[in-house]
Amino acid sequence: PGGGAAAAEGGGEAGAAELTAAEAREVVEAAQAVRKAGKSAKQAVHGWQIELTVRANARGRGDLCVLDPRDGQKLHSVVAVERKLGLSSPPTSDAEGGAEAEGGAKGGAEGGAEA
């Protein structure tokens, strides 16, 4: 009997680890909805625990905590959840790429003028 429970638990974890793109989007949308509601709330979506704790005298501002069931990591922003689920890339690569391309063109023209 104990083995069956362990197998069932393992199956639940494997299901949580293999979210489809649609399920991942649902987790993100749920986190966004909880954040926008501005009220203390707790819910679970596809095994992910989403909780907002509103601060006293903060007029709806609070602390978001999303718990990844696969590794137990706590994420504290919707953007962090998107990144963890592969729905968004880190901004540094986009920002750096744009700055390098822009800086490279300017640097080449300025470098030629100075030399």
Image (cartoon, helix red, strand yellow):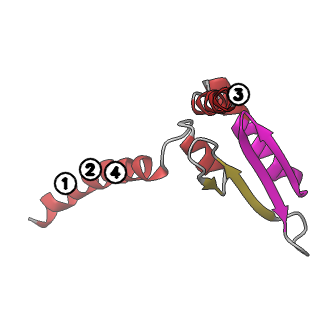
Residue 1, numbered circle = 3
Q: Position of residue 18 (x, y in %)?
A: 57, 27
Residue 108, numbered circle = 1
Label located before the other in sequence (3 or 2): 3
**Residue located 70% across and 39% down the image:** 28
Disc 1 to disc 2, C-alpha distance: 5 Å
Magenta span includes 51: yes
Label located before the other in sequence (3 or 4): 3
Q: Nearer the viewer, residue 80 or 67?
A: 67
Residue stretch rendered in magenta on the structure: 27-54
Label 3 sits on what residue type? Pro
- Quadrant of the image for the C terminus? bottom left
Q: Which residue is mark 4?
A: 102
Magenta span includes 107: no
Q: Position of residue 62 (x, y in %)?
A: 80, 64
Tell me the element at label 1: helix
Label 1 sits on what residue type? Gly
Q: Nearer the viewer, residue 115 or 67?
A: 67
Disc 3 to disc 4, C-alpha distance: 64 Å
Label 1 close to label 2 by CB (< 8 Å): yes
Q: Nearer the viewer, residue 113 or 73?
A: 73
**Residue located 49% across and 42% down the image:** 89
Label 2 sits on what residue type? Ala
**Residue located 31% across and 47% down the image:** 101
Tell me the element at label 4: helix
Label located before the other in sequence (4 or 1): 4
Q: Residues within 10 Å of mark 4 (few under 14, many from 20)?
A: few
Q: Which residue is mark 2?
A: 105
